[in-house]
Image (spheres, rainbow, N blue to C red):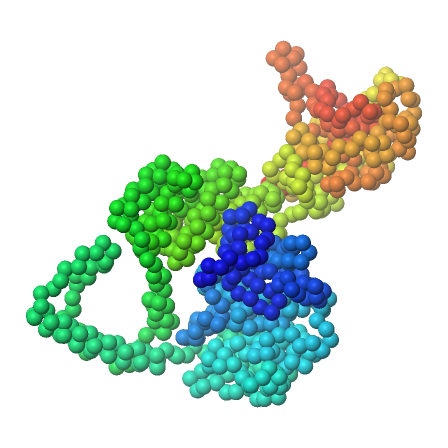
Amino acid sequence: MSSQKPKIVIPGYRIIRKVGEGGMSVVYLAFQESLKREVALKVMRPVITEEESVVKRFEQEAEIIAQLYHPNIVSIYEVGHVDETLLFYSMPYLQHGDLTTFQYHDDAGLKNMLIGICNGLEHAHNQGVIHRDIKPENILFDQFGNVQIADFGIALSTGQQRFTKDRKIVGSVHYMSPEQAESKHIDARSDVYSLGAILYELLTGEPVFDRDSDLSIMMAHLSDPVPALPAEKAHWQGIIDGCLAKSPDGRFQDIKTLRAAIKAVHQQKTGHRLIQWSTLAVVLALVALVTFLQFADDAAKEKPPEVVNNENSVETTDSIGAETVLNVAESVPAEPEADAEQLAANQSTEQKTISPVVNTLSADEEAKLLKAAQRNIERKQLTTPESNNALDDLLKLLRNIPQHPEGLKLLSEVMAGYYELLYQAVLKNDLKQAESFADAVAEVRHRTILTNEDLLLSLETNTEMQRSLMIGAVVEKVQAARNNLNQAKAKSYISLIDRVIPGQELVDELLNNIDSMLRSGQVLTDKLGIKSVVVTPQLGHKKGLLNYGLAVTQSEITWQQYDRFASATQRDLNRCKSSLKVNLIFSQRNYLKPGFKIFNDMPVVCVSWQDAKAYAAWLSQQTGHTYRLPSAREWRHLVRLAGNNSQCGDANLAGQEFPDKDEVEGLYGCNDGVTHVARRSQFSKNALGLYGLNGNVSEWISGCERLGKFKAILKPDDLCDSNSVMGRSWLSSLGDDGGMKKIDFDESWTHIGFRLVRDLRKEQ
C-alpha cells in the first residue's frame, strides 16, 4: 500500500489511495466527509478533459449507471466536477476483488456467479443499455461474494447519442464480438459473446484467442473457429458455442435464454482429480511430520527443553505421536469423494492472514491502553472527546497487536454500543439522532479499515446480531413511511443502512420498493368517476404539516355529483342562506336553486355540514373507499404546500365584477369575470393539482363545537352548537385570510361547499 498522497483535491472527499486506473480515468478509495462513508471515486484524467468526446463519454457513463438500479450493477452516488476540468463520480467501494481473482472449482459456484452477471446484464438490456466492454476487470465482488457489473464507460444506450467516431473500435480485444471488431451495429448479443469469452477463460485459464497483436486477436474473433474445451469440461461446450458464434443470429438471442441454458448445464464432479492430489499431499505431509517428530524426540533425549517466555507467543501443549499419525495416514481412503468448493473455501480462509506488523508497545503500555479503553466504554466515551475515547485507545492497541483478543472484543463492544443507540433512535422515530449514531458507526468502521483492513471482518462478525436488529427496525420504519406515502422519510431511513453498511443489497431492494409508491399529484379515479389527487407529506423541498399522505378530491364536490346522491337517497332540501343583505329575508334557496345559474361541473352549495357527511358516507359505500371531510390540520397542510395565493384573477374572489359593491368592503381591484360560483375548471389548478383551494367556495371541515350543558338540555336532539369552514369564496375580499369560521349548526349557505379526503391509510 503506497503512502504517497494523491495530488487530486475534491471538496467533500478525503482521498486515501489509488486503487485502479484506466485509459481515461483513475479510481481512488476516498472518504466522503458529509456521509462519513468510504466510496470509490472515479476521476477523469485532467489532461484529456479538453477532448469533448471523452468528456461526454464520461458524463454518459455516469448518467447511464445512475439509471440502472440493480443488485448486480454498481450503483452511483454523486456526479460532480471541479473548475470544469476535473470530472468525477462516486460509487460504493467494493474491496473484494474482481473476476480476475475467480478460480473455477466446481460447476455450482461458476453457475451461481454467471447467473448474477446475467441478471445484471438483463436489467441493463431491458433499459436499452448495451455494455460493450464486458471483461473480468469490470465484474466486481461485494462483501457477500455477489457480482456487480461496473464500468459502463462505452455503454451504448438506445436513448443516448454515440460519441465514438465512425469506424472507431471500442471494447477489450480478448472479449470483443466480431461485429465490434468490424465496428458494425451491435445489440445485446454482443454482450452475450463477451460473456462467452469470459466463460472460456474461466474454464481453461487462457483467452479464447491469444495472438501477438491486438489486430491478430480481432481477426481471430472474425474468422478462427472456437476452440474445444478439455474433455472434463466438455459439458460447457454448448454454452461456449451458443455464445461465441461468429454471427449474432447463431448465438443465444438474449441474456434470458443464456441464463436458462447455464442453469440447465449438467452438474459434473470436477473435483475428483483435485482430491487425488490433495490426498497425496496430505500423506506426504503426514510422513514429513512423523519424521520431524521422531527427530525432535531424539533431540529432546540429548538436550533439555528451553523455556521461552514471550507475552505474545502462542503456546501449543498438544502433541501427536508417530503411531497416531501413521494411523491417520492409513485411514485416508485412496479416492475420497469431497466437496471441492469447500476445500477451496478452506484454503482461502487459511490464506487470509493478518498483515505482519511490528509491535512497538511495551507490556505496561498495552495494559494501560486496555484499561483506558474499558474505562471509556463504561463512561460512554466511545469516539468522543477527541483526546480521550475508547476507539483511539483500541486502534492504537490493535495497530500494534492486530490479533489481540481483548482488544478485538472491546472494539466490537464500541461498534455494538453505537448499533444499540442507533436501534433505539430508530424505534423512537428520532431520525436526527439516528443519523448521528449512523455516522458514528461509519466512523468506527472507516477508522478501523484505515488502521488495518483485516480487522473489519472480525468487527462485522462480532456485531452481526446488533446490526440485524438495527436493519429490522429500519425496514419496519421504511414500510410505515411507505404506507404513509412519505417517500422522503423512507429514503432517510434507507440512508441509515447505506451509511453503516456500504454496498448492502438491501438498500437497492428498499429503494426499488418505495419507487412503486403513489406520487404527489397522481390522480386516482373511483368507479363513480370521482377524481382524487395524491398529496404527500412534502412537495419537493417544501414540508407540510402531516407525516402521512392522503388523496383529496380534485375539486369541491360538484352539483352533478351531489345531485346523484340526493336523488338516490331522497335527501331533504335545506333552506339556504346568503350573506347578501337582499337575501336574508324569506329566502327559498336550496342546492337546486341557489339564486344564480347552476352548471353540472360547478361546486355544489347550499348544503349543510350534515349533508356533506352524509354524502361522504354514501360515496364510501358505493365505491369501497373511505371518504371523509378533511380536518383543519389537513386543510392547512394543503394550503401550506400549494401556497395561499390571494391575487385577483388567480381564484374566484370578490372583485370589481361584484353585483353590489356596497355589500362587501375591501374588494379586489380587478374583475375576475365571475359574479357568483365558478365552474370547477374556470380557474387553473394550483401546485398540488387541485381546483378551487384558494377561492370559489369556502369548504366544510370535519369536527364540530359541542353543546354546553345548558344548551344540551334545551336542544337534546342536537349534538353540536356549530360547525367549521375554511378557505376563501366568491364573497371573499382583501381582508379575508381564509381562516376557520364557525357556522351555526345545520345551516347551509350560498358560498359554502365541500371537498373530501380519500383516506389512503385505510386502503393499505
Q: Nearer the viewer, residue 299 or 337?
A: 299
Residue 95 shown left or right of residue 273 in the figure: right
Res. 255 image quadrant: bottom right
Rendered location of residue 719, percent (x, y)? 64, 20
Residue 481 shown left or right of residue 168 in the figure: left
Numbered-mark total: 0
Rendered location of residue 149, percent (x, y)? 55, 66
Rendered location of residue 314, percent (x, y)? 23, 59
Residue 733 shown left or right of residue 196 in the figure: right
Q: Nearer the viewer, residue 740 or 115?
A: 115
Residue at image location 89% in from the left, 27% down from the top: 669
Q: Quadrant of the N terminus?
A: bottom left
Q: Quadrant of the C terminus?
A: top right
Q: Nearer the viewer, residue 319 or 421?
A: 319
Residue at image location 65% in from the left, 55% down from the top: 81
Residue at image location 56% in from the left, 86% down from the top: 212
Asked if residue 677 shows in the view, the reply is no
Q: Nearer the viewer, residue 490 or 314?
A: 314
Q: Is residue 79 above or below residue 225?
A: above
Rendered location of residue 242, percent (x, y)? 57, 81
Asked if residue 454 shows in the view, the reply is yes
* Furthest-left residue in this view: 301
Residue 685 shown left or right of residue 129 in the figure: right
Residue at image location 60% in from the left, 72% down from the top: 133
